[in-house]
Image (spheres, rainbow, N blue to C red):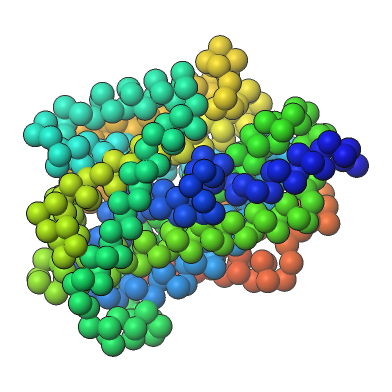
Amino acid sequence: MRTINETEQASKRVTRSPIRQFFSQLGPGLITGAADDDPSGIGTYSIAGASLGFATLWTAILTFPLMSVVQFLCAKIGMVSGMGLAGVLRKHYSRAVLYPAVTGLLIANTINVGTDIGAIAAAINLIVPIPASWLIIPIAVIIVVVQVWASYRAIARVFKWLTLTLFAYIGAAILARPPWGQVLKATFLPQLRWDGQYLTTLVAILGTTISPYLFFWEASEEVEEEINMGRRTLTQRKGATYAELKVAAWDTNVGMFFCNLIFYFVILAAGVTLHTSGRTEIRSAAEAAQALAPLAGNAASLLFAFGLIGSGFLAVPVLSGASAYAVAETFGWECSLDHKPHEAKQFYLVIAVSTLVGLSIDFLGINPMAALFWTAVINGLISPPLLVIIMLVSNNRTIMGNKVNGRGANIIGWVAAAVMFAGAIGMILTWNQQ
């Protein structure tokens, strides 16, 4: 039973969404959606539009309800259980479930960290003539130092404005005068093709929108919110009111709508500018930036670079932070981005190691845009089994009490898992057709 003071705190809490706590000063979900389109996402959407034209526009409509429900379920797990997702698995499930889930997350996030840092370096190279390879290590060190000695909120406040440049894709797509009849047809009438390139792109889109790191991050940040409200013990954190859950669901829907709006127009802009001109392969950030040419002209590279830098600096701390939360919860270590280094040594060590190991990807000679795309594919392969775990946890009455999923959430949640499994299986079966 919550006290009057706790109820007052709860009423304040419901004014924030799970992730929007870092962007709350800029309004309801808008910046959260923009920041969720990280470098891996922007690279994947650009490649999808350039290589397949309008053929994958329909995925923006498909993924919106799936993303919204999945992220809400992860938030609800954290709010009701008072623990992060890995902590819930550690307490209530076999280690045979916990260890593979956390291992898969750690692998995916480490690769994602490396590719996103490489993308930041490539974007800076568009602005200043410094080789991207020279920038990778300094960028990684800066991110780790700021993350350890400051808080994620500090870096978010500095770079969140840069993500607004991603909205330029909307203007660029409209100014390019696309054939709206074809666009609407591709949007509402899915084009399904049984070939390796198409299915791999589909898996990449699913993987970069319904990403493993968001599952763990969402639940753990709910715990951070509870702790910041003074609920230091697990007993104090357990439980959530229907009002809190309702506002969390609404905020998730708003955030994911704007996220998918950007996602849709990135594909459209790349399709109407690059694909129609025969440039179906993107080899660099500069080529991807040309999708903004109708709006920005010669400044397209600069606009694209600023957006990629901003989203990258926001995404990398989230990725490494999600890994650190999961590993720390697995072994019962202290974990909080607001702890000082001496208060959570293992937690920050995971952040540093994950970031530094991820850098190795940037020195393997892999094309930066290809690395972003294949990172999304890897996420698309790891997400399906994690979705099954989330559905089992969110329907477990021992954990969730009377806050288990309703029929609608269950239908959409299991559809999300089935769609991602189907895409992954189809991609594997058609692998030799690429």
Name the spot of residue 238 as percent of width and height, x first: 79, 41
Residue 159: percent from the left, percent from the top?
37, 38
Give percent across and percent down for residue 258. Answer: 45, 61
Q: Name the outermost residue toward the top.
A: 342
Q: Is residue 141 left or right of residue 175?
A: right
> In the rendered view, does 307 fall on the left or right side of 398?
left
- Residue 116 occupies quadrant: top left
Tell me if residue 76 can be seen: yes
Horizontal placement of 308 versus 321: left or right?
A: left
Q: Quadrant of residue 314?
A: top left
**Residue 365 pos. (x, y %):** 16, 39
Disc count in the image?
A: 0
| Quadrant position of the N terminus in the picture | top right
Residue drawn at point x = 74 percent, y = 29 percent? 230
Q: Quadrant of the C terminus?
A: bottom left
**Residue shown at 45%/73% (left/top)?**
61
Q: Can the viewer see residue 111?
A: no
Residue at 54% of width from left, 61% of height from top? Answer: 254
User: In the image shown, does 89 or 161 lie closer to the viewer?
Assistant: 161
Q: Is residue 231 above or below residue 377?
A: above
Identity of the residue drawn at 20% across and 33% down: 363
Residue 360 found in image quarter: top left
